Image: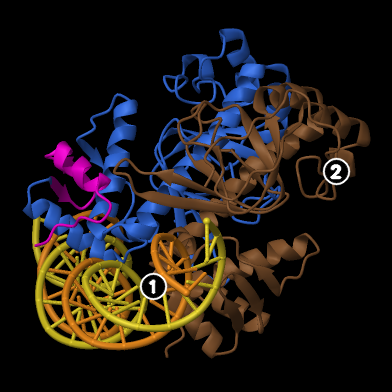
Chain colours: A blue, B brown, C orange, D yellow
DNA sequence: CGCGTTATTGATCCTTATCAATTCCAGTGG
DNA sequence: CCACTGGAATTGATAAGGATCAATAACGCG
């Protein structure tokens, strides 16, 4: 896999969509800004060529420069603890933003890697800060973005701490499903861009357990899965499972 | 326990320390601002009378108005999942800020409660936003504050997902110890403001397990604990435990 | 001093980790 | 085109850590 970081030219190449044309502008940073303000934002956004599967977007410890909005594809982020264990901290889909852990120490705490062919918009943070001082709506969106990341991270606590393997896997699948729905994609049939092992790591399980849960969910005809392809047969049942604190699929 | 929210008069009562006098100003929001800018911040800060143990600072679902810097005492925050289970999301000590989950949905996702007699500075967020547009250093501090919350939340992932009960408890104690040290308080002898059950909930354990770990740690003379009083006898050994991914104190 | 809450300690069970073997698949090269 | 190969996934057997249930003890507060 190619491990070179992609480069972002100072001014984006022609031929890439601008924010005002982007169909994600209603869930991304431009959310509810005026056209003229979106143009100002657009002027500092840098669009490079797509990352390939396995490409690293940034590495833990690198100086913080930009946050990245995902245009297409998907990204995983992870931290490395001091004894070298890796903990996946999130999977990010189009319209979502990675790198928000950067401002804390002015360097990235996470590493970020493309799970498939992925296009991102790089937004240099210092320029974004400056712009958001002039555009109150943008400042507000930025605060919301950070705050939302806090909120989703905290949701994960309950999942990791207190729930059965079944609930954890179901939760992840439901979360992905909802996010697909938001993009007007099928919420019931989509590809899982990450490996079982990635899911397991993210959910605080082993890959064997994840695999077994997949098995059970298929046995019950709640999902159909073959490798990376997922079809949710009974969305209601899956949601049910995802929201139960401890319940599991007693075989 | 008194469940009334405290009220914050529009302009603070006399006799409360201002930011420029506050010994926490080097770790709180005013961090590395100029005196004149700190005064501007100070002008929007509201200081009420202290909360008592059990007092609610804000409740999940309430409209978001302010973030709160803790001056003395301690606060716990928690989320309530849709099936009514409570998950403690953090313990906050002086100089730390709660309410950062508010901007996401313009309402608090967490509830916050005083664990002991606690003084807080309320900072109305819309006024803070406005001010931070004029004071770039303040805006930067705010972004850092949010980003740091993301970072500490993500650290918790690895703990909850992958580590032994011993490691989790040790981690919490080490974290508290380090934060006490930052305030020039003893890092080895302090009071635990929260119950065993709170710790357990936060760490994704049961209170019985937490109690047992305390027992083991005392057996090994790593800590001495009696109820809420904690003395760390061997800080090194505790840190060791806290950083090991899976190791546990096989009895 | 007595009650209720909080913490400790003990015995047992269950879920999931761990270890191990096998299968499946994608990609490769002959 | 098909056999090979190596990573990913599945499946099975076992064991361990922590949850659960239960009883007791210690403390704080009125």
Q: Tell me the distance, in whole angstroms, between the alpha carbons under discs 2 and 1.
A: 44 Å
| Chain identifier of the residue bearing label 2 in the image | B
Which residue is painted at 82% across and 46% down in the image? Answer: B25
For disc 2, the marked residue is B32
Q: Is residue B13 above or below residue A242?
A: above
Query: Does residue A54 appear anywhere in the picture?
Result: no
Q: Quadrant of residue A231?
A: top left
What is the crowding at mark 1: few (fewer than 14 residues within 10 Å), some, or many (at least 20)? few
Local secondary structure at mark 1: helix
Q: Is residue A212 left or right of residue A173?
A: left
Local secondary structure at mark 2: loop
- Mark in front: 2 vs 1: 1
Q: Earlier in the sequence, mark 2 or mark 1?
A: 2
Place of residue A133 in the rendered image (x, y in percent of width and height, measured from the top left): 73, 22
For disc 1, the marked residue is B208
Place of residue A204 in the rendered image (x, y in percent of width and height, measured from the top left): 37, 62
Q: Nearer the viewer, residue D1 or B103?
A: B103
| Chain identifier of the residue bearing label 1 in the image | B
Q: Is residue B18 above or below residue A110?
A: above
Q: Nearer the viewer, residue B117 or D29?
A: D29
Place of residue B29 in the rendered image (x, y in percent of width and height, measured from the top left): 76, 40
Q: Are marks 2 and 1 in contact (CB under 8 Å)?
A: no
Which residue is painted at 39% across and 73% down in the image? Answer: B208
Q: Which residues are magenta?
A: A223-251
Q: Quadrant of residue B228?
A: bottom right
Q: Is residue A98 left or right of residue B42?
A: left
Q: Which mark is residue A238?
A: none
């Amino acid at each position: 896999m190619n491990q070179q970081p992609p480069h972002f030219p100072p001014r984006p190449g022609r031929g890439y969509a601008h924010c005002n044309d982007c169909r994600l502008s209603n869930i991304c940073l431009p959310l509810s800004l005026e056209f003229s303000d979106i143009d100002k934002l657009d002027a500092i956004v840098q669009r490079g060529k797509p990352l390939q599967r396995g490409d690293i977007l940034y590495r833990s410890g690198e100086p913080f420069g930009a946050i990245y909005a995902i245009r297409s594809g998907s990204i995983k982020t992870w931290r490395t603890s001091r004894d070298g264990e890796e903990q996946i901290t999130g999977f990010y889909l189009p319209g979502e933003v990675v790198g928000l852990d950067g401002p804390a120490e002015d360097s990235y705490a996470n590493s970020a890697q493309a799970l498939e062919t992925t296009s991102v918009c790089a937004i240099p943070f210092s320029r974004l800060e400056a712009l958001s001082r002039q555009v109150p709506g943008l400042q507000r969106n930025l605060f919301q973005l950070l705050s939302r990341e806090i909120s989703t991270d905290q949701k994960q606590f309950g999942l990791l701490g207190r729930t059965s393997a079944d609930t954890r896997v179901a939760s992840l699948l439901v979360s992905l499903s909802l996010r697909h729905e938001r993009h007007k994609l099928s919420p019931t049939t989509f590809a899982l861009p990450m490996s079982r092992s990635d899911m397991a790591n993210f959910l605080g399980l082993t890959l064997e357990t994840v695999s077994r849960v997949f098995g059970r969910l298929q046995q019950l005809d709640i999902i159909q899965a073959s490798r990376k392809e997922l079809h949710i047969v009974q969305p209601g049942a899956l949601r049910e499972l995802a929201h139960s604190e401890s319940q599991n699929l007693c075989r």
